[in-house]
Amino acid sequence: MVVMRVVESPATVAPHSRPSWSGKGQIAIDNLSVVFGDNPKTQHIAVKDVTLDIPAGQFLVLLGPSGCGKSTVLNAIAGFVEPTQGRVTIDGVVPEGPGADRGMVFQQPTLFPWRTVLDNVAFGPLMTGRGKSAAESEARTFLEMVGLSKFATRYPAALSGGMQQRVGIARALANYPKVLLMDEPFGALDSQTRVMMQEGLLKLWNEFRITVIFVTHDIEEAIFLGDRVVVMGTAPGHVIADIPIELPRPREHAVLFDPYFARVKRQCMELIRVETMKAFEQQGEEK
Ligand SMILES: Nc1ncnc2c1ncn2[C@@H]1O[C@H](COP(=O)(O)OP(=O)(O)OP(=O)(O)O)[C@@H](O)[C@H]1O
Ligand SMILES: [Mg+2]
């Protein structure tokens, strides 16, 4: 593995003033391996021996070529995928399947099309037993944070892709998760919207400082957002580099022109290029 200096998280700030925000969310991934399939001849090792200690409040980005197991690691944290070996703990506890303590945002918005924007965001609070008006009031607060108060009564189909993703983020946050898991959430957006979404996400994170694990293919996005960029290699998926991003916050897009940014970008490009070539060679040998 390259550059193995694990960064301390930025100062873990006091939890958000809302009483229901736990403010924790330390994740320990110990020797995680995930194998898909039971038949030894056809089974596939998606992830092998991934170990990561993620302090509460850290913004960690998982970067790597297609098929290297980024989503599998994220899904193991979310509880959608069972580790074949090793374990994942959240604040020292092995979670039993998916839970509201781990909010998830996917590449394609997964809003309920038959519910209004407000009802989509209020859904989580309602499920925790809050009354309708309390849940709606909570939902309005989060919609305001993502700048969509005026769209509360619309249905998802009447929103742009970027707006739907903002609703998805508001919906995830309305459950007050300890951890926000984001799987290429801006991957389907145009580059301008993407930049706005990245800056907006950092503002939200700056307020709540919950732990974020953000998956992307995009090297600039990774460096712009992360406290730390973990680069994964393929076949099987494993960690090849753990790079602290020592850019001051708050960050704006002008930082992309910083010489430090360019150096880290080059390092990541080289790592991913080597991995992609290895994957191509292996595929060639398998023919
Ligand atoms: N349910 C599954 N059954 C069998 N194989 C799977 C399953 N899910 C993932 N895989 C395989 O595991 C490997 C890792 O997949 P994963 O989706 O985690 O990669 P990824 O890094 O997220 O890729 P991408 O960037 O394309 O989203 C791939 O080879 C994939 O084909
Ligand atoms: Mg994926």
Image (cartoon, helix red, strand yellow):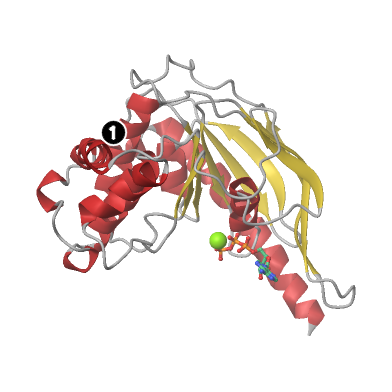
- Where is residue 183 drawn, in percent x and y? 49, 54
Viewer-proximal residue among 142 and 197 = 142
Q: In the figure, is residue 169 to the left or right of 84?
A: left
> Which one is in front, 172 or 162?
172
* Quarter of the image where ligand 1 sits: bottom right
Query: In the rendered view, would you say 96 is above or below 27?
Result: below
Instruction: Name the residue: 46% across, 36% down.
Output: 177
Q: What x and y, as percent, mark residue 147? A: 17, 42
Residue 187 lies left or right of residue 54; in this view the side is left
Give the secondary structure at mark 1. Answer: loop
Coordinates of residue 58 in the picture (x, y in percent): 51, 29
Q: Is mark 1 within 8 Å of ligand 1?
A: no
Can residue 193 be seen here? The reply is: no
Residue to which mark 1 is pinned? 252
- Which quadrant of the rendered structure holds the N terminus? top right
- Residue at 82% of width from left, 72% of height from top? 43
| Between 269 and 25, the one nearer to me in the picture | 25
